[in-house]
Structure formats: C-alpha cells, structure tokens
Image: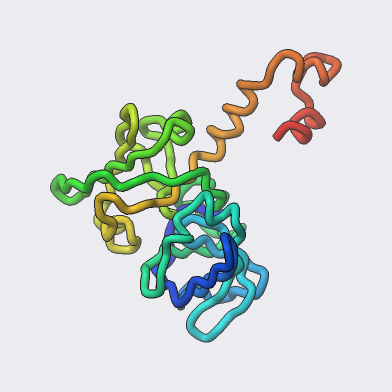
Amino acid sequence: MFTGIVEETGRIRQVSLEGSSGKIAVEAFKVLEGTQIGDSIAVNGVCLTVISLASRGFTADVMAETIRRSNLGLLKPGDAVNLERAMAADGRFGGHMVAGHIDGTGVIKSCRREENAVWVTVGTGPEILRLIIEKGSVCIDGISLTVAKVERDSFQVSVIPHTGAETTLLKRRAGDIVNLENDMVAKYVEKLLTLGSSDLEKTNSGRITMEFLEEYL
C-alpha cells in the first residue's frame, strides 16, 4: 500500500525486456533506506518488488501485464521516475490509499500556468473517467492528486509548486504517456453497485455478508 506522496525521483539505469517481460534497474538513494530484498517500491505508481539491491539503486522484475497496463515499457536509460516506498504503519497518511496497481494510461494534453500553480490536462478513456469525480483523488505516475475538473474525454489537476518540484509531472510534455490509478474506494463501490440480484441471492438471506464480500471482492 502507498500514499501517492513521492519520496524522490530516480533514474532508469536499464530496462531489459524479453518479449513483454523482464527487469528494470533504477538509480535511487532515499528509497533505499531500510529497504530489503522482497520489499515493494512504486515506480511511476507501479508497485514493483525489489529483487536485488546496490549501493545506488535496485532492480525489480516486470511482468507482461505490467507492461500492457503502464508506461514502464516506454522507459529508457536516463529517464526520471517517481519513487515511493510502501507506507509505514506508524507514519502519517499524507495522500490517499494507492495500491500501485495501474488501471490504465492517459496522455498529457496540455500544461497551463495560473499564478503559482500549473493546470495539467490528461486525456484518457471512459473506463478510467467513469471513476473520476471532481474533488476526488487520482494517482498520476504515482502522484496523489485532487481532480479539479472532469470533461468528456479528459480531466484536469492543479499542481502546486512543491509537487511540481519534487516529481516528474511538470517535466512532461503534450503527448507523453502517464500511468493512472483510480481511487480504490471508488472501484469497490462500483463493484458492489453492479452486483445483480442473482448474486445477492447466493447469500441466502439476500444481505451482504463477510463471506459474500470475500468471494466477490
């Protein structure tokens, strides 16, 4: 589990793919503190498992499903990426609940400055937009952001100076592909609302039980 509060930006050292899977090596510093093999680190919002550690970086496996769903397959050596360790149970929860499981991608359409903030417009498909609401949460390349506006084929976020300085978002240009993760709560609510009466009949009582939730969620 993550919060979407980026700890540092790292650099891609190497992407080694055979077909649609392989390994990714990332240069990093801060996120290495306390990290052990088997721990999770979000790279551009994608939850990856550390398989080896070096003095200035780590390596993780990347499977085909990850390449299909995210922008990791487009990365090349030298590219900057947002990094976050899995959240600690005793830490502050500064963003929103982020699983690191990418729902799809979007395309940067424009960046427009308004005084100290920058409005970023992201185009994406209906499968992502249906779960995005104004003033709700969305994760873009691992960054927890508040949705400022939703349109037919895009949404907008307003990026404060600190977020712009500490992440890769404002270095993006029109046409760049970004990873998107919808709000986790919205996905569970949608699933519950779309369950049919025949599904509920399986609970015998017609009520939602813990056993029912374990089977369907």
Q: Position of residue 196 (x, y in %)?
A: 69, 17
Q: Which colour style is shown?
A: rainbow
Viewed as shown, does residue 52 lie left or right of 31?
Answer: right
Q: Is residue 27 visible?
A: no
Q: 122 or 5, which lies in front? A: 122
Residue 191 sits above or below residue 139 on the image: above
On-image quarter of the C terminus: top right
Outermost residue toward the bottom in this view:
55
Residue 189, image quadrant: top right
Q: Residue at x 58, y 80 (%)?
A: 53
Q: Position of residue 84 (x, y in %)?
A: 49, 63
Outermost residue toward the front in this view:
19
Q: 142 or 128, which lies in front? A: 128
Q: Position of residue 8 (x, y in %)?
A: 41, 68
Q: Is residue 162 visible?
A: yes
Q: Position of residue 100 (x, y in %)?
A: 55, 53
Residue 136 sits above or below residue 204 on the image: below
Residue 10, image quadrant: bottom left
Q: 112 or 30, which lies in front? A: 112
Viewed as shown, does residue 175 lie left or right of 178?
Answer: left
Q: Residue at x 45, y 56 (%)?
A: 71
Viewed as shown, does residue 83 lie left or right of 215?
Answer: left
Q: How many marks?
A: 0
Q: Residue at x 30, y 33 (%)?
A: 149
